[in-house]
Image (cartoon, rainbow, N blue to C red):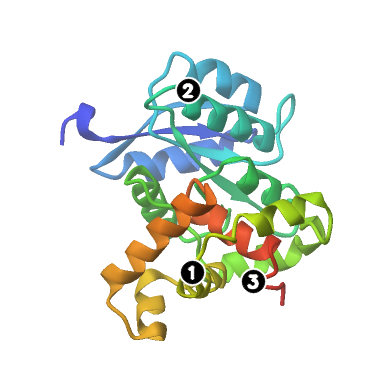
Amino acid sequence: MSEGEKIRVFLVDDQQLVRTGFRMLVDSQDDMAVVGEAGDGAAALELLEVTRADVVLMDVRMPRLDGVEATRRLAARAETAAGAPRVIVLTTFDLDEYAFAAIKAGAAAFLLKDAAPPDLLGAIRAVHGGDSVVAPSTTRRLLDHFAGSLPDHDASGAAAHDRLDTLTDREREVLTLVGRGRSNTEIAADLVVAEATVKTHVSRILAKTGSRDRVQLVVLAYETGLVTPG
């Protein structure tokens, strides 16, 4: 595979040893290559202005500019410029209270830092392919942990509920299952329908709710109470 066909990965972490480990893992793959790295969010944003990347592996806690704000700014770029990279947030579950905010800021996926190498590589490929990675176990643990960050009966929660008004009963059912971390294959089995039908429902839910990807659907399901922590 030529260099131009490989998935271009950019690393952002304030620990050199962590970046070195990720670089070795990514560069060992025939279909991907590390094209740059930075030790904080501010440096990453500067370098990504002049470095073409497809996927960014973003740490959450960093000096100068943290991963939440860096992700938010990259997501804003994606709305105005074609080819902007998508972000995978890497979080240490016991420490990163900012992980939920990072997802809302525009991350396409989140993984724990102790994820198995095949899971990380699979996430890079999935995100590059336009999908979002919401591992069921990680989804439940993280969103349960950050339940206090979710709106209750305030204006934000009301606005989230308004986004469900145009959904059919079946689409709400599908959204609930997405929020529980179910894959399209699992949802198809649950509802006894074809997987292609589930994909159609998910696409319509994304369009009707103005959600960017599957990650945002999970957040929406929790915000509106379709799925509750625990």
**Mark 1 crowdedness (10 Å alpha carbons): few <14, some 14-19, many ≥20:** few
Q: Residue at x 63, y 51 (%)?
A: 91
* Residue identifier under label 3: 226
Task: Describe the element under mark 2 as helix, strand or loop.
Answer: helix
Q: Is residue 140 left or right of residue 209?
A: right
Q: Amino acid at mark 1?
A: Thr
Mark 2 → mark 1, Cα distance in angstroms: 32 Å
Front residue (pair 67, 104): 104
Give the residue at mark 1.
168
Which residue sits furthest left?
Answer: 1
Question: How far is the residue under mark 1 from the one under mark 3?
Answer: 14 Å
Mark nearest the camera among 1 and 3 is: 1
User: Which quadrant of the view contains residue 145?
Assistant: bottom right
Choose the circle earlier in sequence order: 1 or 3: 1
Q: Is residue 37 visible?
A: yes
Q: Is 96 in front, or is 129? A: 129
- Of residues 51 and 101, the one drawn nearer to the viewer in this rendering: 101
| Residue 80: mark in rendering | 2
